[in-house]
Amino acid sequence: MNLTSLDDLARLGAQLRAEGKTVVFTNGVFDILHAGHVTYLEAARALGDVLIVGVNADASVQRLKGPERPVNMLADRLTVLQALRCVDHVVAFDDDTPLRVIESLVPQILVKGGDYTRDTVVGADVVEQHGGRVEIIPLLDGRSTTGIINRVRTV
């Protein structure tokens, strides 16, 4: 399901917690979906009952990664992520970080990839203040969107 507002997200988070479900949240650009993304998302989903994925909107991606990104527009990235069995819900956000999303959802588990540490995960303090935890999942070696783009450019 594609969530369209922070209010929807807050309601969903409260409902899932009331049902006793463990909510897992992660976020990213997910521009050109590859095996590293899928492996990461499957590992994140295995940590709980529901996986909600935050996705940077196009303007946010441009600010973070440059004017040539994203390669795939937001609607397409959301469609691809929603098609994965391991992803239960997606939510787009315009900010450069997912902090407001995390504050609205208040997941029990916040997941990021191995290129992060607990101290660099945005929202870690929010999740931990509510009794949740941060999990760092190792990256799949040699898989990155930037790497794919660079290989395509040299062909």
Image (cartoon, grey):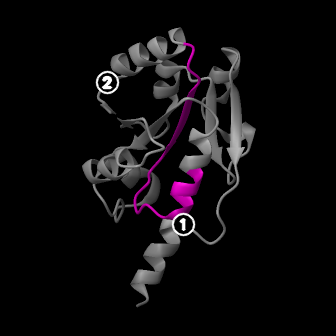
Image coordinates of residue 134 in percent, x first then y, are 69, 33
Name which quarter of the figure residue 47 lies in. Answer: top right
Residue displayed at 70% across by 44% down: 136
Amino acid type, mark 2: Ser
37 left or right of 92? right
In terms of depth relative to the viewer, which is nearer, 17 or 26? 17
Of callouts 1 and 2, the N-terminal one: 2
Image coordinates of residue 29 in percent, x first then y, are 44, 51
Name which quarter of the figure residue 107 lies in. Answer: top right
Amino acid type, mark 1: Ser
In terms of depth relative to the viewer, which is nearer, 23 or 95? 23
In terms of depth relative to the viewer, which is nearer, 13 or 55? 13
Image coordinates of residue 97 in percent, x first then y, are 50, 37
120 left or right of 21? right
Residue under circle 1?
Answer: 144
SS class of the residue under badge 1? loop
What is the spatial separation of the Cα atoms under label 1 and label 2, in whole angstroms?
29 Å
SS class of the residue under badge 2? loop
Residue displayed at 40% across by 58% down: 31
- Could you tell me if the residues under marks 1 and 2 are in contact, i.e. CB atoms within 8 Å? no
Residue under circle 2?
Answer: 5
The crowding category of the residue bearing disc 2, from other C-alpha atoms within 10 Å (few below 14, some 14 to 19, many at least 20), is few
In the displayed image of the protein, which residue is found farthest to the top? Answer: 18
Q: Magenta part of the protein: which range?
A: 20-40
